[in-house]
Image (tube, rainbow, N blue to C red):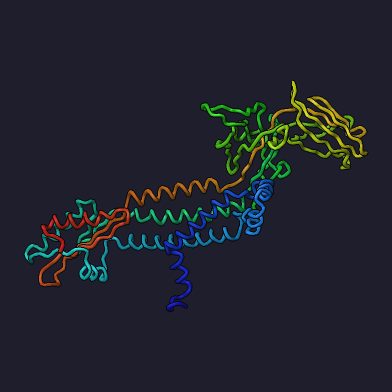
Amino acid sequence: MKHGVPPVRRIRRTLRSPRFVAWLLGALGLYLVVGSIIPQRSLDAAAVTRWAGRYPALGATFEALGLHEAFSHPMFLGMLFVLTASTVVCAWDRTARAARIMRSRGTVDARQVEALRTRPGARFEFDADDAEARYRDAGDALRRIGLRVRSGPLISEASSGAWGLLGSPIFHWAIVGLLLVVPVGALTRSEGLIGIVAGYEKPDVVESYGRLERGALHASMSGLTIGVEKDMPVEFIEDGIDRGAAPVVYLRDGDRELARGRVYPNKPLHHGALTVHISDWGLGAVTTLLEGDIASEPSQVLIDRDETSASGWASVTETYADPTGAEVASATFAPEFGANVAVRVEVARRDGSTISRVMGVGDAVDLADGVSLRIDHLGKYARLSVVDDWSISLLYALLVVACLSVGVSVLVPYRAAWVLLDRSGDVPALCVSVSHSRGDSGFVERVMVGVGAAVGKEDS
């Protein structure tokens, strides 16, 4: 135990240290920059693989350090925990100080009187005959600079902006809220990519997503219907700016439409905790599996763009089964562009035979005896990023509270002054002391000059 200071007190002192907090914020900021530069496996696993191949030495190092999972790494979570603890300590201290000052407004105890007498900010001496008049003049001077004065026979207390004391505690508690809501929100949120052919819909259930990440405490998917209108421009011009792909997306609960809007970068669709962004677009085919007179539910086949491919497009393979669940064939779809959009379908049957056909809307291909696949629709599809996160609105609200509280602290600074009529010496004197917020340091001079001018004396 260093110098007899208890460990808890030393920890608390460290957490309150501005130097420690500055170093911690610097380290956290640097870590966030690194995490934003390095591909994150949770966002794009393929990008991590490509990055590691391009920088093999760094890739091995960053993999060992866990920097491809930067925002779930124990190092990041540890720094976030320490920063939260430090902010809680600061918030608690500022709250206690504000409460103490607000409770004591208008009162002066014996300790304060003794401090005013022995260690004043300024001392003005007078003849005994006019001491009381000078004392009253000092109170009037404090009123003229905007303070509320409470005068007793020998001591006056003047203050303003007491509510401004709440600005700093509220700001720090808002930051604490942000630091707590962020990890809790991460545990309860879901985020995934869902592809929907323009003119069609999909339910918001796990099976609809190509990629889905769910926090450990995420309850369940919304079950709402997500739809994309048929007309989907891929070069949407607004205010003279090409916004890229901009589908009209809607959310529906049964027959009741809940939300609708055109979605493009920086303009998502919101409804409750759900936020829908546009991620990309590609070619979509709607197919139906036919067995005799029985038709399956339509299925959406999504073909992505691929800038590394010579054609600029990828291909996608789907597996098909008969009503008993037995696999009958697989089909690989790739776009074909001519007079009309079509797809090349390469079928690999269970019996080992293969077939390749270019198909348009209405065409069918045999997958097995009595089982065929029909193309019902060809068009664009929207790859949507769907986020289910209740914490987003709360985060914005806490940010607003934090900004407003800073404004209160700056615009309504706490200021206080005390004047004591001291008769303990050979001649009477006025002892003046001042307290002020750091944002209003000129207040000291205004009080001293004002009181000095009012009583016709210089600071002694």
Q: Position of residue 293 (x, y in %)?
A: 88, 29
Q: Quadrant of the C terminus?
A: bottom left
The image quadrant that residue 148 belongs to is: bottom left
**Residue 459 lies in what quarter of the image?**
bottom left
Q: In the displayed structure, would residue 257 be above or below residue 192?
A: above
Which residue is at a point 76% across and 36% down the rendered structure image?
315
**Count of number-bearing discs:** 0
Q: Quadrant of residue 21?
A: bottom left
Image height check: is 102 above or below 349? Answer: below
Residue 93 percent across, percent down from the top left: 41, 63
Asked if residue 460 lies left or right of residue 325, the reply is left
Does the rendering let one see residue 91?
yes
Give the camera-side residue of 331 and 437. Answer: 331
Outermost residue toward the top? Answer: 339
Relative to 159, 92 lies left or right? right
State left or right for residue 345 relative to residue 413.
Answer: right
Q: Residue 60, percent across and down?
A: 66, 56
Answer above or below: position of 141 versus 274: below
On the picture, is 164 further left or further right than 417?
right
Residue 123 at x, y percent in the picture:
17, 64
Q: Residue at x 6, y 64 (%)?
A: 129
* Vertical comparison of 318 with 435: above or below: above
Asked whether the viewer can see residue 213, the reply is no
